[in-house]
Image (cartoon, grey):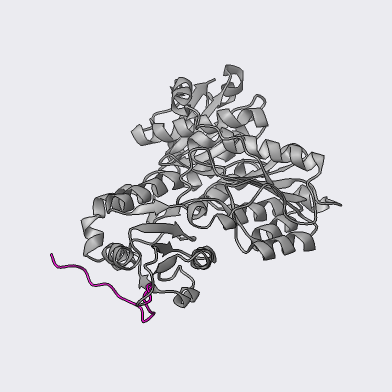
Amino acid sequence: MSPLPVARSSNPPGLVPGSPAKITIGILAGGGRLPLMIAESASQRGTAVHIVGIEGEADPAIARFPHTWVSWGQIGRMVMALAQDGGRQMVIAGAATRPDLKRIRPDAGFFRNLPFIVRLLAGGDDAVLKRVVRFFEGHGFEVLGVHQVSPDLLAGPGRMGAEMLSAANRADAEIGFAVRRALAAVDAGQAVAVADGKVLAIEGAEGTDAMLQRVAALPFRGALRLPMGVLTKGPKPGQELRVDMPAIGPHTIERAAAAGLAGVAVASGAVLIVDRADAIRMADVHGCALEGLADPATAPPSGPAAASRLLKGRVIGRRRPNRRDAADIETGLMAVERLAPFATGRGVVVVRRYVRAIEAAEGSAAMLERAAGLRRQWGLRWRKAGAFVRRAEAGEEGKGLAALLRRVAAQELAGVALMGPVHALAAWEDAGRLADDLGLFLVLCEA
């Protein structure tokens, strides 16, 4: 097969004739300011760049640098542009919405790599991104992280603005960091909001900004006289930092302040500060503390073994979970078990082992509604897939349980799994007929 053509820009190449050879780094650019910031930082260090921008995602301002535009599906063109114009070192940066597979314009490279693309549809974000790294490494690239190319963009230790975290804020930040570490095994919880020792929200598939909007909407937050609590953010243990380093920016600070939080605490040396000067200015304007804190590195816990220990439940009713449902239940059990010591995470929604939403202060009903809005992933609509996993508590009444089952069915999940002691599960013993009528499996797991 003849080489795929590469659409080139009219910009001059990264090497100037007659000048000493420069190292050239390719930047695969999604949306936002980060790809441009990397290009500016690298250029200031004397490194040439070539940006391969994804149409509809990347900022048009990448035209200030040597660049090539590609669309979703033009995998062959993407690889050729990075290899020919960006050298063999590359950075993947910027936000990207999962594309609608019905609308992409595939090239020959897309079809050659179709098995890989299909595998991308399974798993959480970290699993997807690790496969992306392996894909480019398999094509001869060295994938670098932003922290390796532009270390000046990372949050350092200590205070960055005028305000300082109070002792109470630091205690809340420690809880937030601990919750993140507890969720490492299920690839969730990059950001956590905590106030007065209570977990307000845990980031799921919706992203940090949407999580902060959820905190702002909590009824009891509107009565605050003074800001209280912190947003904590950092990588999950074992996270693929070369393509998924956590980031905050001015909008994060603004939304945290709007949610009534007194500060933002990030893992020092492991979080990018986008538009640092503006972020610090925004923090000072709102009287919001912004600090980098040490986050003890821990390996991801060996969760699957613990979850399998819990998955010795009884099926109530005729419908039984299939193999994929069982994997979702295991992931959910792992999450709710690990969050129990923090008095949060009573319920989670898991689809294809991907933790879509985690319940915190908003309650199960609101969490299920939120999860329903996140059903579309990569342009596909899963029907009757996934599980709502919940810790059962004593004193629950039949009417409330029936309403909960109906909410789960309305979200087109496959079923429900409850974990708890025997006395807490007793109220669910008679719910099998309703689960059958709603087309749900119902599993009771004695903890």
Q: Position of residue 403 (x, y in %)?
A: 58, 40
Q: Is residue 314 left or right of residue 282?
A: left
Dominant secondary structure of the magenta stretch?
loop
Quarter location, residue 368: top right
Residue nearest the viewer, comparing 215 with 381: 215
In this view of the protein, which residue sits in the foreground, 325 or 111? 111
Image position, residue 366 (x, y; %): 62, 47
- 176 falls in the magenta region: no
Residue at 55%, 46% in the rendered image:
204
User: Is any atom of residue 383 visible in this view?
Assistant: no
The residue located at (48%, 51%) in the rendering is: 244
Up/down of 21 relative to 357, above or below = below
Q: Position of residue 359 (x, y in %)?
A: 61, 41
Vertically, is 386 above or below 88? above
Picture layout, residue 375 above or below residue 47: above
Single out the residue that lies furthest toward the bottom.
10
